[in-house]
Image (cartoon, grey):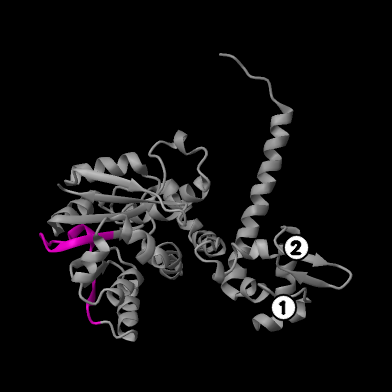
C-alpha cells in the first residue's frame, strides 16, 4: 500500500476553504434575516444612509440593524463609508437580494439554511438511529416553500411553463380538467383558475396547513372553479379524469414516489399530459461536481426531502434523484414519451413533459 506524503499546501488551501464555508454559512443566516425583515428591500435605491436611517426606513430596532450591517459590510454585500458613517446597497447586489428582483432573488432561498438548522439535532439522531424527521417538525417550511414556488413557478407559469406543452394554453382557454399533486399552498392552481375560467382545477396535498392556505386564497379572490383536498399523493385513486396533471418540486420527497407517478398516469385521460418540475441534476454524484448549487441541494435533500420520506416509512428518494432515475421511474409508471426542458429563470429545476402515447 502506497502512503501519500502529507501535502502542507493542500492542507492550508483546504483550511482556508473551510473558513470560507464558515463565513458563507454565517452570511446565509444574515441574508435570510435581511430578507425576512425587509432590510434589503428598504435599502434598495436608498442613498447612503446611517444605521438609524436604515432602521427607520425598515421600521426596525437600530441596534440590531447596526450589527446586521456589520456582517453585511465585512461580507462584501453592503458598502460602508466610515467618514460619514453611512451604508449603501449597490444596485448590482440588490439585483439578486430584493423581492423586486424575483425570480432572481437568492435571498429568499437563504431562508432554507435557518429552517434546516432548526432540525439539526433530530437529523443527527437519525444518522445514529435511522428513520427520519416528519414534515411537522420543520418550522416555516410551508411558508418558505410557498415563497420559493411563487418565484420559480407562479411568476413564470402562464408565460413560460405552460407553453412548454404545445397547444396547452389554447386547451385551457377552451376548458379542461387539471390536477396539481402536492399543491402546497395552492398558488399555482389559484392563478390558473383565475386565468382560465372555463377549465376546472384541483389541488391535493397531505398538509392541512397548506390546504387551508390554498382555500383561503381561493376564497379571497372569489375563485369557484378550483377545489383543494387533503389527500395522500400516493393514493390518488382516480382513473382517466384529468387532461393535465402537474407536480411542482413535489415528487422526490414523497414516501412512495413510484406509487405517486403510477397514480398520476392512471388519473390522466388517454391524451393527457403530465408536467413535472423537479430538481435539475444527475442521478450520479460524479456528474454533479460542477452543479452550481450542488452542495445546497444535497444538504436540503439530506436534512429534509430524504428525511421526511423516511419518517413516513418511505424509500427516501431525495432531491438529487436526478434525470436518469426520473426517466426510469416515469417509464415504469407507464409514460412512453418523456421530454426534458430547462427555463432560463429556473436554474435549479428541469421540466419533464410526459405522455403515455
Residue 14 vertical position relative to residue 320 in the rendered view, above or below: above
Image check: 59 left or right of 74?
A: left
The tag on residue 54 is: 1
Residue 262 vertical position relative to residue 170 in the rendered view, above or below: above
Question: Badge 1: how crowded within 10 Å, few (<14), some, or many (20+)?
Answer: many
Residue at left 65%, top 84%?
A: 59
Image position, residue 31 (x, y; %):
62, 64
Residue 52 vertical position relative to residue 33 in the rendered view, above or below: below
Q: Which residue is mark 2?
A: 73
Q: Is residue 235 magenta?
A: yes
Which secondary structure lies at badge 2? helix
Image position, residue 290 (x, y; %):
52, 39
Residue 231 seen in this snapshot: no
Q: Quadrant of residue 38?
A: bottom right
Q: Quadrant of residue 199?
A: bottom left
Which secondary structure lies at badge 1? helix
Image check: 291 left or right of 93?
A: left
Q: Earlier in the sequence, mark 2 or mark 1?
A: 1
Image position, residue 33 (x, y; %):
60, 69
Tag 2 near tag 1, CB within 8 Å: no
Location of the N terminus (image quadrant): top right
Instruction: In this rendered view, identify the residue nearer to me: 230 or 194.
Output: 194
Q: Is residue 156 magenta?
A: no
- Rounded to the nearest angstrom, the CA distance separating label 2 from label 1 is 14 Å
Instruction: In this rendered view, identify the residue nearer to me: 40 or 231.
Output: 40
Question: Badge 2: how crowded within 10 Å, few (<14), some, or many (20+)?
Answer: some
Residue at left 35%, top 42%?
A: 323
Image position, residue 245 (x, y; %):
23, 60
Which region is colored magenta?
Answer: 224-246
Residue 72 seen in this snapshot: yes
Looking at the rendered structure, the number of numbered marks drawn on it comes to: 2
Amino acid at each position: 500500500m502506497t502512503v501519500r506524503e502529507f501535502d502542507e499546501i493542500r492542507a492550508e488551501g483546504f483550511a482556508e476553504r473551510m473558513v470560507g464555508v464558515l463565513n458563507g454559512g454565517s452570511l446565509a443566516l444574515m441574508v435570510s434575516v435581511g430578507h425576512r425583515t425587509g432590510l434589503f428591500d428598504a435599502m434598495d435605491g436608498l442613498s447612503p444612509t446611517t444605521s438609524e436611517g436604515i432602521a427607520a426606513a425598515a421600521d426596525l430596532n437600530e441596534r440590531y440593524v447596526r450589527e446586521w450591517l456589520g456582517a453585511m459590510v465585512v461580507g462584501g454585500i453592503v458598502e460602508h463609508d466610515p467618514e460619514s458613517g453611512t451604508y449603501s446597497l449597490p444596485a448590482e447586489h440588490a439585483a439578486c437580494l430584493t423581492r423586486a428582483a424575483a425570480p432572481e432573488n437568492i435571498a429568499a432561498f437563504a431562508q432554507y439554511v435557518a429552517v434546516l438548522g432548526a432540525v439539526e439535532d433530530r437529523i443527527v439522531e437519525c444518522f445514529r438511529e435511522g428513520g427520519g424527521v416528519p414534515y411537522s417538525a420543520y418550522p416555516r417550511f410551508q411558508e418558505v416553500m410557498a415563497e420559493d414556488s411563487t418565484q420559480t413557478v407562479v411568476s413564470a407559469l402562464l408565460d413560460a411553463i405552460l407553453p412548454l406543452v404545445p397547444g396547452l394554453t389554447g386547451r385551457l382557454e377552451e376548458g379542461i380538467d387539471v390536477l396539481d399533486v402536492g399543491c402546497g399552498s395552492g398558488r399555482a392552481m389559484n392563478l390558473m383558475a383565475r386565468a382560465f375560467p372555463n377549465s376546472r382545477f384541483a389541488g391535493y396535498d397531505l398538509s392541512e396547513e397548506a390546504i387551508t392556505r390554498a382555500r383561503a386564497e381561493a376564497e379571497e379572490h372569489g375563485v369557484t372553479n378550483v377545489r383543494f383536498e387533503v389527500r395522500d399523493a400516493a393514493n390518488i385513486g382516480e382513473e382517466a379524469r384529468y387532461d393535465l396533471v402537474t407536480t411542482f418540486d413535489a415528487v422526490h420527497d414523497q414516501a412512495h414516489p413510484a406509487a405517486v407517478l403510477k397514480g398520476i398516469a392512471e388519473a390522466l385521460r388517454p391524451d393527457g399530459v403530465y408536467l413535472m418540475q423537479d430538481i435539475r441534476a444527475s442521478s450520479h454524484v460524479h456528474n454533479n461536481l460542477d452543479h452550481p448549487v450542488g452542495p445546497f441541494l444535497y444538504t436540503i435533500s439530506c436534512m429534509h426531502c430524504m428525511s421526511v420520506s423516511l419518517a413516513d416509512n418511505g424509500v427516501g428518494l431525495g432531491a438529487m434523484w436526478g434525470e436518469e432515475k426520473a426517466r426510469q421511474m416515469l417509464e415504469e409508471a407507464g409514460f412512453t414519451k418523456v421530454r426534458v426542458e430547462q427555463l432560463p429563470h429556473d436554474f435549479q429545476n428541469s421540466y419533464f413533459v410526459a405522455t403515455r402515447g
